[in-house]
Image (cartoon, grey):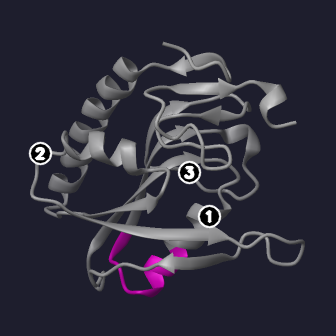
Amino acid sequence: MMHQDVKKILVSLDEIVKRSEELGKEIKEDYESRNEIPLVVGLLKGSVPFLAELVKHIDMDIIYEFMDVSSYEGTESVGKIKVNLDLQTPVQGKPVLLVEDIIDTGRTIEEVKKLILEKGASSVKVVSLLDKPERRVVDVKADFVGFVVPNEFVIGYGLDYNQKYRNLPFIGVLKDECYQ
């Protein structure tokens, strides 16, 4: 059932599950081809529903962890991140797979990748449920993408507006009047 604040549904739950199965297989094949097992890192809070679905379909003995980062707001510091919750597992010499809900401007994922490489990870790859290339301001690409979405305000399946709508079981477009 559609929520009253949703203009339209872009991606259904069935489509998310099916694509998560495909991504899980791709990720397994990619890491097995290099004889590696990734440390899977979910970026809080948005990636949680996607990570929970995705890991069911990565058929290898992975470990997963969480990081919580926020972008500084303000004219001078846009793109710099603050780490609210850091990794508990050392990444030195390990391949890391970052799980993201959406890549929008690309600033956050670029900074998180740099941070993890500075901690000594052997590699950092990114899987993102959604990609919104029209909004990109830095040249960053996910290694694995669920769905490319248009430049609209998307919510649901982890994505929020003012912390609301994360629990919707689909990706939808928020009605304009809800945020203007």
Q: Which label lies toward us, 2 or 3?
A: 2
3D distance between C-alphas at marks 1 and 2: 28 Å
Quarter assignment of residue 133 = top right
Secondary element under disc 2, as helix, strand or loop, is loop
**Which residue: 57% across, 40% down?**
131
Contact (CB < 8 A) between labels 2 and 3? no
Q: Indicate which disc, 2 or 3, sits on the residue closer to the N terminus.
A: 2
- Judge from the rendering whether residue 120 lies leftward or rightward of residue 34; answer left or right: right
> Residue 166 lies in magenta, yes or no?
no
Q: Secondary structure at mark 3?
A: loop
The residue carrying pointer 1 sits among few (fewer than 14), some (14 to 19) or many (20 or more) residues within 10 Å by Cα, namely many
Locate residue 37, reporting x and y percent.
Answer: 17, 63
Characterize the local packing of mark 3: few (<14), some (14-19) or many (20 or more) Cα atoms within 10 angstroms: some
Name which residue type carries label 1. Answer: Thr
The magenta region covers 114-123
What residue lies at 81% left-to-right and 27% top-to-bottom?
176
The residue lying at 59 percent from left, 25 percent from top is 172
Residue position marked by numbered label 3 in the rendering: 141
Whether the magenta-drawn stretch holds residue 121 is answered as: yes
Along the viewing direction, whichever of 1 and 157 lies nearer the viewer? 1
In the rendered image, the quadrant that contains the C terminus is top right
Q: Quick one: 40 or 143, which is closer to the camera?
A: 40
Q: Earlier in the sequence, mark 3 or mark 1?
A: 1
Q: Which residue is mark 1?
A: 108
x then y, percent, for residue 15: 38, 20
User: What amino acid type is highlighted by mark number 3?
Assistant: Lys
In the picture of the structure, the residue carrying the numbered disc 2 is: 59
Three-letter amino acid code of the residue under disc 2: Asp
